[in-house]
Image (cartoon, helix red, strand yellow):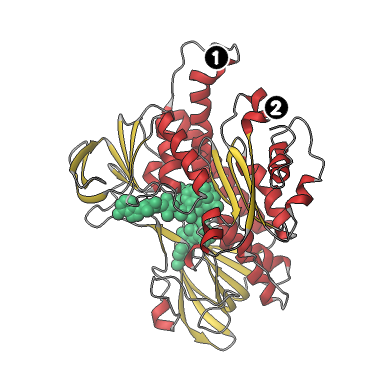
Amino acid sequence: MSKNFDVVVIGGGPGGYIAAIRAAQLGFSTACIDEWKNAKGGAAPGGTCTNVGCIPSKALLQSSEHYEHAGHAFSDHGIEVKGLSLDMKKMLARKDTVVKQNNDGILYLFKKNKVTFFHGRGSFVKAVEGGHEIKIAGATEESIVAKHVIVATGSNPRALPGADFDEKLILSNTGALAIADVPKRLGVIGAGVIGLEMGSVWRRLGSEVTVLEALPAFLGAVDEQVAKEAQKQFTKQGLAISLGVKIGAITAGKNDVTVNYVDDKGTAQKAVFDRLIVSIGRIPNTIGLNAEAVGLKLDERGFVAVDGDCKTSLPNVWAVGDVVRGPMLAHKAEEEGVAVAERIAGQHGHVNFNTIPWVIYTSPEIAWVGKTEQQLKAEKVPYKAGSFPFLANGRARALGDTTGFVKFLADAKTDEILGVHIIGPQASELISEAVVAMEFRASSEDIARICHAHPSLSEAVKEAALAVDGRALNF
Ligand code: FAD
Ligand code: NAI
């Protein structure tokens, strides 16, 4: 096997494995190095997303939603479920199977595209003639030479000072996705994406969930109207959300965790939980890369410093995904991976940061692309807004899921769509239409004049676009 490659990717998450496949498609001899181990110590490419992120969280969200529907929502349809019970072992085993299918899928794709896969930790050794020497420490140790290196080493969960993750009582996303028995009292610190998704899973399965958030505003980055509706719905579902808290000492006992905090009124509080999930953001992972020794520059927050094209401070070394600036999202990592492979091939790789969608997979789902209303106000951009509630959508009524709305924000003069915000059923799927429209710089009138199938949830998107000019037909 050749020890020289045109492209070596360090990290096999969505940024890395996709970059490797695209590089191979473009005719480069390509290797991808990933150190993730499955329970048996074998290779498990796919990174955080596949192993302890996007995929297992969505598997559990689906399972827990089925459980909740079987318990409540089905009876509205005239379906009575008797003797409902929960087999946590089976639910977790199914989630693990879904993860493994994805790991295996990536190994298959590597074979298909002739990407050489190395299982182990990759690190920079030195610059050599023809590129960079990379050491791989796995079952054995070997060295390869890469003309181009793509760093895609991802991120790790941020711990609270004095409360290290033990993954038994104090859990990161890894532990939160593998709780063997439904905890009676579950604490969540951080009402961000992970806190709300994981809090929803365990609430649906029976936990009393308390979410403690430092900021005074709920989902501050989300359009205010959507955030307000989301807070109302989650509270109605039983998530106890406290905003504006200041977390103090956290002490793990034998079977429980005590969290001391000061609430938004300045009163000292103490809460005891059977499990505590800490989801207060993630930090870039450059551990073991030997970045410093070879002069790979990090920024002041520890991310690999890159320019707009994902070029690092070293010649022919690129970086993509969670380890560089920008949203920590799998699809953003993938887009950067493809763009870098294409730039290496002399093509015009392109990532449009204005049209990266966000989705929170709670129930109702929350999805958005582009600017929020508060951003447009702050930037003094004149805009028009139009909304349409799912309550007025026939398909949503047939589904029995009428929570939420679609909201369009368009430029007051040109009518160009500036942002679309959805809270409600299938928001994760519906947002794609808005992404496509914004990518093509469409106006709200363009969407309003397109024929949408009836009855479908997508009609709510069309109606919201019509509402921008006060022409909604069904509301
Ligand atoms: P990662 O996926 O972190 O992959 C990096 C890989 O590099 C890992 O396999 C790591 O082991 C490996 N590695 C690191 N250093 C080395 C080294 N020196 N040598 C060899 N290998 C190395 N995003 C979404 O878009 N949608 C979602 O629904 C979503 N859900 C999420 C749910 C949770 C609970 C979490 C935690 C995250 C979620 N994310 C989601 C975020 C998403 O997982 C990340 O944005 C994405 O995984 C980043 O991809 P990446 O390739 O940059 O890094
Ligand atoms: P987050 O940034 O989404 O939320 C963290 C929350 O914790 C914030 O609301 C923050 O104000 C709060 N916080 C920070 N420090 C705190 C403290 N000391 N006390 C109390 N609250 C505190 O981060 P999260 O949820 O950890 O997720 C990390 C990232 O993973 C997300 O930002 C996202 O990029 C990605 N992700 C994406 C998902 C998706 O796309 N559906 C799902 C899950 C994660």
- In the image, 63: left or right of 173? right
Q: Nearer the viewer, residue 92 or 399?
A: 399
Identify which residue is drawn at 69% across, 37% down. 460
Q: Position of residue 259 (x, y in %)?
A: 22, 44
Image disc number at residue 394: 2
Q: Position of residue 59 (x, y in %)?
A: 53, 38
- Up the image or down, 123 lies above or below 367; here it is below
Which quadrant holds the C terminus?
top right
Q: Nearer the viewer, residue 116 or 371?
A: 371
Q: Nearer the viewer, residue 417 or 412?
A: 412
- Up the image or down, 9 lies above or below 415; here it is below
- In the image, 464: left or right of 95? right
Which residue of the protein is positioned furthest toward the bottom in this rendering?
129
Identify which residue is drawn at 46% across, 12% down. 83
Identify which residue is drawn at 42% across, 49% down. 192
Give the residue number, with chain letter if any, for mark 1.
Answer: 75
Residue type beneath disc 1? Ser
